C-alpha cells in the first residue's frame, strides 16, 4: 500500500502510457500467451496423433523398405487418391521388406528444394537492399540535422 508521502511511487510513469509502448506491451504479451496456449494445443494434438499412429502406422515406419520408384511429382489422379501427395506434392513408391507391401511415401524433390532456396535468397537480397537504403537515408537525415545544429550555433555567435 502507498502512503501519502510516497504517492508518486505508486503511479504508472507517463512514459509507459504512450501508445507505442502500450502497443509493444500488447504485442509482447499476446505473443507470449499465443506461445503458451499454442504449445498446450499442440501437445494435445500430438498425443491424439500418437494414439492413431500406433494403430495405423505405415509399414515404412515400422520396418525396412526399398525404394521402388524415385521421388516424383504427383499427377492429377494421384493427388486425389494418394494421401501422401497432399503433404509435399511429391511421392516415392516403396516396398516394405517384411510385409512385402507397396506403399507411397511423401518426399521432398530436389527441384522444389532448389526453388525454395532461390526464393529465400531473393527475399534476403531484397531485404538487404531495402534496409541499406533505409540506413543511408537515416544517415543523411542525421548528418543534415547535425550540420543544421552546427550552423545555428555558429550563427548565434
Image (cartoon, rainbow, N blue to C red):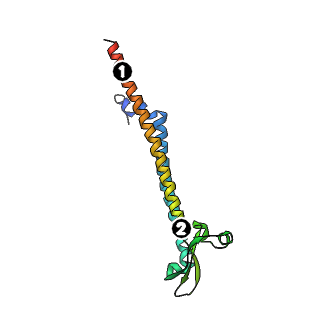
Q: Quadrant of the N terminus?
A: top left
- The dot on residue 109 is 2
Expressed as whole percent of the image width and height from the top left, the position of residue 122 reads 50, 51
- In the rendered image, the residue lying farthest to the top is 157
Whether residue 126 is visible here, answered yes or no, is yes
Say whether residue 109 is left or right of residue 76. left
Q: 109 or 40: which is nearer to us? A: 109
- The dot on residue 87 is none
* Label 1 neighbour load within 10 Å: few <14, some 14-19, many 20+: few
Q: CA distance from mark 2 to mark 1?
A: 60 Å
Hey, which quadrant is residue 90 in on the image?
Answer: bottom right
* Label 2 neighbour load within 10 Å: few <14, some 14-19, many 20+: some
Q: Is 101 located above or below residue 53 in the figure?
A: below
Say whether residue 2 is left or right of residue 108. left
Q: Earlier in the sequence, mark 2 or mark 1?
A: 2
Q: Residue at coordinates 47% horizontally, 41% vertically from top-left?
A: 130
Q: Quadrant of the C terminus?
A: top left
Q: 59 or 28: which is nearer to us? A: 59
Can you tell which of label 2 and label 1 is closer to the viewer? 2
Q: Which residue is mark 1?
A: 149
Q: Residue at coordinates 34% horizontally, 30% vertically from top-left?
A: 6
- In the rendered image, the residue lying farthest to the left is 157
- Mark 2 touches mark 1? (CB < 8 Å): no
Q: 146 or 17: which is nearer to us? A: 146
Query: What SS does tag 2 mark?
Result: loop
Amino acid at each position: 500500500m502507498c502512503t501519502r508521502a510516497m504517492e508518486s511511487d505508486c503511479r504508472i510513469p507517463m512514459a509507459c502510457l504512450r501508445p507505442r509502448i502500450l502497443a509493444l506491451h500488447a504485442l509482447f504479451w499476446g505473443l507470449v500467451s499465443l506461445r503458451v496456449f499454442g504449445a498446450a494445443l499442440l501437445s494435445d494434438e500430438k498425443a491424439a496423433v500418437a494414439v492413431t499412429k500406433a494403430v495405423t502406422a505405415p509399414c515404412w515406419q515400422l520396418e525396412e523398405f526399398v525404394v521402388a520408384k524415385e521421388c516424383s511429382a504427383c499427377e492429377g489422379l494421384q493427388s486425389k487418391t494418394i494421401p501422401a501427395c497432399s503433404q509435399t506434392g511429391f511421392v516415392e513408391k516403396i516396398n516394405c521388406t517384411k510385409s512385402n507391401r507397396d506403399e507411397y511415401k511423401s518426399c521432398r524433390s530436389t527441384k522444389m528444394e532448389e526453388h525454395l532456396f532461390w526464393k529465400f535468397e531473393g527475399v534476403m537480397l531484397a531485404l538487404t537492399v531495402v534496409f541499406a537504403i533505409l540506413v543511408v537515408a537515416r544517415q543523411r537525415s542525421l548528418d543534415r540535422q547535425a550540420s543544421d545544429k552546427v550552423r545555428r550555433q555558429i550563427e548565434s555567435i
